[in-house]
Amino acid sequence: MTQAFADKVLAWFDVFGRHDLPWQKSLTPYPVWISEIMLQQTQVQTVIPYFNRFMMRFPSVTALASADLDEVLSLWTGLGYYARARNLHKTARIISEYHQGQFPRSQQDLLQLPGIGRSTAGAISSICFNERVAILDGNVKRVISRVFAIGGWPGQRETAQQLWQQAEAMLPYDRMNAYTQAMMDLGATICLSRAPLCDVCPVSRQCQALDRSSVTDYPGKKPKVAKPTRSTIMLVIKTKGGEVRLTQRPPEGIWGGLYSFPELTQAQLDELKLPSPPQALPKLKHSFTHFHLLIEPVLVEIESRGDLPKIDNEAWVSDDNSQAFGLCRPAQKIIQALLA
Ligand code: SF4
């Protein structure tokens, strides 16, 4: 079945695969890497404009390595999961300094770089260097779990191991570059999560989930765990001239390195000597992987910046310069509402 499976997937890809995505213009490691990282938590259509802007500003790994992290984060604003952008920057510096600007060519060597996991390393080495290794992004997990009726949630170790083994067992002996892209495309355009297009699927005859009429049972769902909700107050200081005061967050932790409004507890807010009582702004809810954050922004208007003592890593942002800062999503929303 192995080669027959790959042959069908490849024949389908040649006719129906996606061949005009911006990162397919040149199948070289730098654009493939950037697109793979952007696509990890985000849909293709959302990624395209971010990818184009990023490549325009940082056309090579050395350009990215010599950029300021702030600028990298500002181009990432809105994509979320900012550790990805910080790792891109770190890895670009390592490649520039220790690899003469050249990407390692094997999955094993790529895996040593920050932010590059097994699937991303496999995508780069198979697409760019034809290495015979598997990938297992969200789309491919769906295809493999259905074709082989592998139940269980892919986030569990045993399930993931089974999926990797099966993905590796199905690899063809040539055209690895096309096969990797074909598997991604099959998952993204045919084996859709809610309503897969089994009628036009090239591997429908081999698909065990289809045979059992249970395609949407695969892959298994993540066990539900109730997320706790934490709350915080964000202090929004705004001048009459339309500037707001932000602070750059420490490099580690949530929104690391991004700009946000200073966070306070109610007790800390009560102790602050402010020129006027804070006014409550509409609350926001932001969800992280492990918890929800309920944000209560409060606004204090002042005449000018000089009316308050400076805080650490402060930056004053107006409608004109807000694009230049890597802002966390809630700060972006508050600013949009206030300065619009
Ligand atoms: S037959 Fe349907 S469920 Fe099976 S791989 Fe194809 S699209 Fe997915």
Image (cartoon, rainbow, N blue to C red):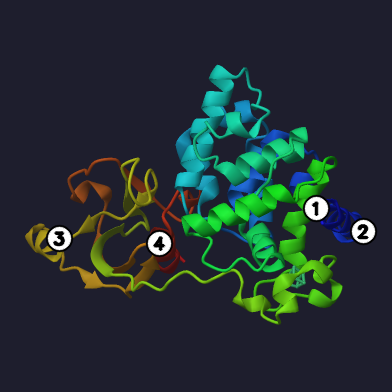
Between disc 2 and disc 1, the foreground one is 1
Give the distance between the C-alpha atoms of the residues marked 2 and 1, in whole angstroms. 21 Å
- Relative placement, left or right, of 315 versus 158 is left
Circles 1 and 3 in contact, beta carbons < 8 Å: no
Give the distance between the C-alpha atoms of the residues marked 4 and 1, in whole angstroms. 37 Å
Q: Find out if the beta carbon at label 1 lies less than 8 Å from the nearest ligand 1 atom.
A: no
User: In this rendering, does residue 66 appear at all?
Assistant: no
Q: Nearer the viewer, residue 148 or 200?
A: 148
Q: Is residue 295 above or below residue 123?
A: below
The residue that mark 3 highlights is 275
Q: Is residue 83 above or below residue 187?
A: above
Classify residue 290 by image quadrant. bottom left
Q: Which residue is located at x 72 percent, y 63 percent?
A: 188
Residue 101, x across and y down, in percent? 63, 22
- Quadrant where the N terminus sits is bottom right
Q: Which mark is residue 15?
A: 2
Dot 4, how many residues are within 10 Å of its Cα: few (below 14), some (14-19), or many (20+)?
Answer: few
Residue 173, x across and y down, in percent? 82, 40
- Label 2 sits on a secondary structure element that is helix
Classify residue 243 by image quadrant. bottom left
- Relative placement, left or right, of 69 versus 262 is right
The residue that mark 4 highlights is 289
Circles 3 and 2 in contact, beta carbons < 8 Å: no
**What amino acid type should be assigned to the residue bearing mark 3?**
Pro
Dot 3, how many residues are within 10 Å of its Cα: few (below 14), some (14-19), or many (20+)?
Answer: few
Between disc 4 and disc 1, the foreground one is 1
The residue that mark 1 highlights is 2
